[in-house]
Image (cartoon, rainbow, N blue to C red):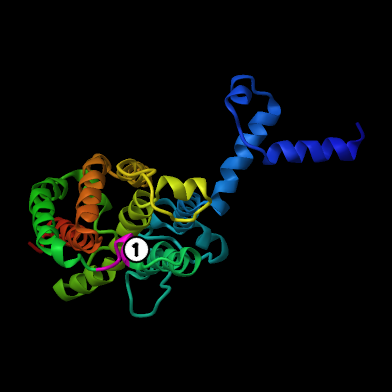
């Protein structure tokens, strides 16, 4: 067999399927095939494109939204909560400029770009990904889950505000010249929570929970069938959300396990991320306010 025939045979095998016999008796070609088929799913099937694009966009936002890649091309960049007293001013008149840039670029990466993918790549309505308001039949449930999630979480956030590590970490920008500046900062903080809730509770959760078995088999056809991920989508988004918080203060890190599940279930039941976004933002405003003793 000449080299061209061997090369053709290798690529033909790489493009082929995996059967039980090959997995039972693998060779090095099997390893390459598994890698290739895994990468291929990022471009072929909708679940792969959702997971792959979410992974890349979260990586671009960086460790806790620090936009580390931005620092490679912009030497003045420090990141949210870093060198508060000595960093150079990037936006005139805005003391929390690094935080503002991180929050709003995060919203662009984790909300705007997925919206473009959904509308023009998947050609699906945004409401399927939790971006619409709760449907009529679910609005009372949405209000109930919002109130329950917020009120039950308040004691935990109160306790967190008295933890030494949490007090050192939050607010990400401080000190404030007064209540007005604090409130303005917290308003600019809102896009952070839209970004974090949409990428996990919207794009990943709704995107994966809505994938059906036949859509996988037929390469994204979207025909009716048994749900492929279904309840596991809740665990997938919770796992990735918790992983993103590694390195955060311990009360926050362990709290993400509970929040990830509860907020995911609430958003999915309401068919909307907005009750969860509002709850998450208000709770963190409360946390910051307690720490700096506004309330």
In the image, farthest residue toward the top? 25
Magenta stretch: residue 131 in it? Answer: yes
Tell me where residue 286 appears, x and y as whole percent. Answer: 14, 59
Residue 243 in the image: above or below residue 73: above
Determine the secondary structure under disc 1. loop
The residue furthest front is 224
How many discs appear? 1
x and y, in percent, of residue 99 in the image: 35, 65
* Residue at the far right in the pictured view: 2
Q: Is residue 274 magenta?
A: no
Residue marked by disc 1: 85
- The percent coordinates of residue 291 (x first, y second) are 15, 56
Q: From the viewer's perspective, is 64 left or right of 266? A: right
Q: Is residue 196 visible?
A: yes
Q: Residues within 10 Å of mark 1 (few under 14, many from 20)?
A: few
Seen from the viewer's position, the closer of residues 190 and 73 is 190
For residue 5, what is the image quadrant?
top right
> At 44% from the left edge and 61% from the top edge, which residue is drawn?
78
Quarter of the figure with the N terminus: top right
Foreground residue among 247 and 46: 46
- At x 8%, y 57%, the residue is 144
Is 180 rendered above or below residue 162? below
Q: Which residues are magenta?
A: 127-132
In the image, 270: left or right of 18? left
Above-or-below relation of 152 to 78: above
Which one is nearer the viewer's eye here, 25 or 293?
Answer: 25
Say which quarter of the image contains residue 247: top left
Locate the C terminus and report the quarter of the image it occupies.
Answer: bottom left
Determine whether, in the image, residue 277 is placed left or right of residue 123.
Answer: left
Q: Quadrant of residue 94?
A: bottom left
């Amino acid at each position: 067999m000449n080299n061209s025939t061997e090369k053709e045979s290798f690529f033909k095998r790489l493009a082929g399927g995996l059967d039980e016999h090959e997995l039972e008796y693998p060779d090095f070609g099997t390893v390459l095939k598994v890698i290739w088929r895994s990468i291929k799913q990022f471009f072929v099937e909708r679940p792969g494109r959702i997971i792959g694009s979410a992974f890349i966009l979260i990586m671009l936002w960086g460790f806790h939204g620090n936009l580390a890649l931005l620092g490679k091309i912009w030497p003045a960049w420090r990141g949210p909560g870093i060198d508060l007293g000595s960093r150079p001013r990037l936006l005139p008149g805005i003391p929390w400029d690094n935080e503002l840039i991180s929050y709003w670029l995060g919203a662009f990466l984790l909300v705007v770009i997925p919206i473009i993918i959904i509308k023009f790549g998947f050609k699906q309505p945004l409401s399927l990904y939790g971006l619409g308001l709760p449907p009529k039949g679910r609005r009372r449930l949405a209000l109930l889950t919002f109130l329950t999630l917020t009120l039950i979480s308040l004691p935990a956030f109160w306790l967190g505000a008295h933890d030494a590590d949490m007090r050192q970490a939050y607010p990400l920008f401080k000190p404030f010249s007064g209540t007005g500046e604090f409130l303005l900062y917290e308003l600019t903080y809102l896009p952070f929570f839209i970004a974090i809730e949409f990428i996990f509770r919207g794009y990943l959760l709704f995107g994966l929970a809505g994938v059906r078995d036949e859509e996988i088999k037929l390469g994204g056809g979207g025909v009716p069938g048994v749900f492929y991920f279904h309840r596991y989508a809740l665990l997938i988004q919770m796992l990735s959300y918790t992983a993103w918080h590694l390195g955060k203060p311990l009360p926050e890190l362990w709290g993400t396990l509970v929040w990830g599940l509860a907020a995911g279930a609430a958003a999915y039941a309401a068919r909307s991320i907005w009750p969860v976004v509002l709850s998450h933002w208000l709770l963190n405003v409360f946390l910051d306010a307690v720490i700096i003793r506004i309330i």
